Image (tube, rainbow, N blue to C red):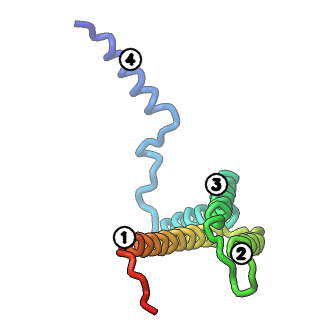
Amino acid sequence: MNRSWRPLARKQSRSLCTSGFRHFSDITWDASDTDVSNLLDSQIKKGSGSEPTPHQLLTTRREALSLYRDIFRYSVLFVWKDEAGRPWRDVLREGARQEFEMARYLKDPEQVNRLLLSGRDAVEKVLEKFEAKRQQIQQQEDAAAQAPFQPTSP
């Protein structure tokens, strides 16, 4: 039986103990309440910085661009005109452009994420309503096509 792994395991465990891991003798066991609260406050302040990291910024930019493209993609479905005679497609695109321009220079990642989530939710709701209405119209057309033809009497 080959037991060559045991010395290697002992070497690794020794190197783990001496290579930067904290020993129990380094831990302060008698910390006061103020020490603990100061430590927690400093950790909370570190985590809640308002300045986004480059990775977060890139991710929110991608999300915003994806949402904007989806709005443009789905606006093609709205072919009818509004009261002023403009196609709804153009109205929706202009509205989306204005919303994105107003939020362009926001620095707070929480606000940006909230806007992205509400925008994504709005797009999904509009698509669901559009699909429901399309199915309703399709069912009405199918029912009208299957109904027997009855000429009107003069």
User: Could you give the CA–CA distance between mark 1 and mark 2, rounded to whole angstroms?
Assistant: 32 Å
Q: Residue at x 35, y 15 (%)?
A: 7
Determine whether 22 is above or below 104 in the image: above
Residue corresponding to mark 4: 8
Q: Is residue 60 visible?
A: no
Residue 87, disc: 2
User: Could you give the CA–CA distance between mark 1 and mark 3, rounded to whole angstroms?
Assistant: 51 Å
The reply to whether callout 1 and callout 2 are in contact (CB within 8 Å) is: no
Residue type pointed to by label 2: Pro
Q: Nearer the viewer, residue 123 or 48?
A: 123
Q: Within 10 angstroms of label 4, few (less than 14), some, or many (20 or more) residues?
A: few
Residue corresponding to mark 1: 146
User: Could you give the CA–CA distance between mark 4 and mark 1, rounded to whole angstroms?
Assistant: 81 Å
Name the secondary structure under disc 1.
helix
Q: Nearer the viewer, residue 154 or 7?
A: 154
Q: Earlier in the sequence, mark 1 or mark 3?
A: 3
User: Could you give the CA–CA distance between mark 4 and mark 2, rounded to whole angstroms?
Assistant: 74 Å
